[in-house]
Amino acid sequence: MDQLSNEDFSKRVADVMDIEDVTWGEPKIPYWQSPEKGYIVRFRGNLRMDRSQASDRLGDEFTRHQISAIVQEAQGRHSIILIQDPFSGIISEFFSIEKTQWAEEANSSYIVRFLGRLEQDSILAYDQISARVAEKEVTLLFRREEGRHAVILLKGRNRPGRSNPWLNLVLFLLTVLSTLYIGAISFYDGPQLEQGEFYTVLLQRIWTGWPFALGLLSILLAHEFGHYFAGRIHKAAVTLPYFIPLPIPPFGTLGAFIQLKDPPKNKRVLLDIGVAGPLAGLVVAIVVLLIGLSNSEVHALSTDDALMLEGNSILYFVSKYLVFGELLPAPETYGNANPVLFWVRYFFTGSPPPLGGRDVLIHPLALAGWGGVLVTSLNLIPAGQLDGGHLIYVLLGRKARRLRPYILIALFILGFAWNGWWLWALIIYMLGRVFAEPLDQITELDSRRRAIAILGLIIFALTFTPIPLQVILPPG
């Protein structure tokens, strides 16, 4: 690469500007750290052409020398700043640069933006460019802007800190105890006791909750480690699962989550990590559910006592039919109602209550499997940082934000049948604005992953439970 002299700089700039004064700077200081000092030379004067033409012409003159020209205008006066440019040469190996925009403020979040068109595979280009700019403590973004590709370099790199696995272990052990306790409460079959004595006996018999705890924790572990191993395969910085104990019915836990410490590299990585959890968890949930149902019994529903019925998803509804050969909960009579309309109404409203009819008296494993199906559907709600939010984002991109108002309206309406949806509507209203945006937004899904993403949304429809729990009081 030829070295340019001070005279060369002045001569080339004089072709586009009537120079009035010249200020020499200190090129050893990176421009993006201190625009006031980090330049080779600044020329001030009046341009002989418009800014865009001047910028393009100077770019042709200086880029091959790893120098960039920044053309500015302030208070009717123009400036041309020449800076050392370690990036354009790297970017141009993969990218046809049409326009270069350097940050003009020291506190700007980005260093430089290149607009143009990628000329190589986006995944290969991202990996190679990112590796070469990493040593300069720079983060690489790929975007689509103004109908063109954009390569954006940000200041700094994320350095994920180390997690404390002891916290994960302690939370898991507390969740084991919590789910054992709820399993023992839910399926206590001993003599009737006073309240104080009841809880003392439960603590002594806490081990009796093991079928429920084993089933539910197996599903949650499969779900979270599905995320975890998918993340590790893609070399993403992910934590071990954090379990949330909550020793109250119906589950004894609020579930679990893992933390992705870095933004996902591209939509394919985001999909793989996002969908692996629900798929793995659902497979285990179906196995647990079917084993649990096969150990359950169908009983008549009492008309004298209050009942708490678990809600129906399409998957749960079909599973009960496969095991027992009848549609449950079965009403005492359909009366004059059309059976199809009866089930559609009951599915979404829980009415009319099936008093005097029949339903499953579920085994602890069946309750755990039903809970796993419910957790899958909640995670697949297509909003924000939920797994379903990842699926809808990789399919629709930023257009996915348009769905949020409709999801909120649907949850608000469903809240009249089950009040818990109002809490979910509030959560999505507060936290559902932001999606996990990948660093590389140019790389699209391949056809196989697109089909998997659509499958994830179909699973959401099959597992969605409009009324998760329903308390039915006896007449009168």
Image (spheres, helix red, strand yellow):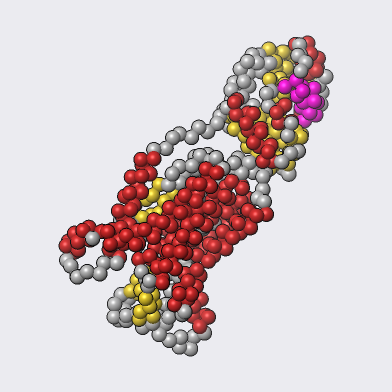
Q: How many marks?
A: 0
Residue placed most toward the observer, 415 or 49:
415
Relative vertical location of residue 139 with respect to residue 4 in this rendering, above or below: below
Quadrant holding the N terminus? top right
Q: Is residue 19 visible?
A: no
- The range drawn in magenta is 52-66
Residue 137 screen position, x and y as percent = 57, 27
Query: Closest to the observer: 327 or 438?
Result: 327
Where residue 310 appears, x then y in whole percent? 40, 69
Q: Residue at x 65, y 50 (%)?
A: 445
Depth order, front residue of 228/28: 228
Compared across the picture, whether 145 is left or right of 293 comes to right
User: Horizontal placement of 100 versus 465: left or right?
Assistant: right
In front: 301, or 79? 301
Q: Which residue lies most toward the bottom here?
A: 336
At 78% from the left edge and 18% from the top edge, which residue is drawn?
13
Residue 254: where, in percent of width, then height?
Answer: 38, 54
Q: Quadrant of the C terminus?
A: bottom left
Secondary structure mostly seen in magenta is: helix
Task: Identify the residue at image location x=83%, y=19%.
Answer: 15
**Residue 169 location, quadrant:** top left
From this viewpoint, is residue 272 visible?
yes
The residue shown at (81%, 14%) is 11
Query: Looking at the picture, does residue 378 appear above or below residue 126?
Result: below
Residue 444 left/right relative to 214? right
Residue 429 versus residue 364 in the image, above or below: above
Q: Residue 75: image x %, image y %?
A: 69, 24
Where on the picture, by quarter, is residue 30? Answer: top right
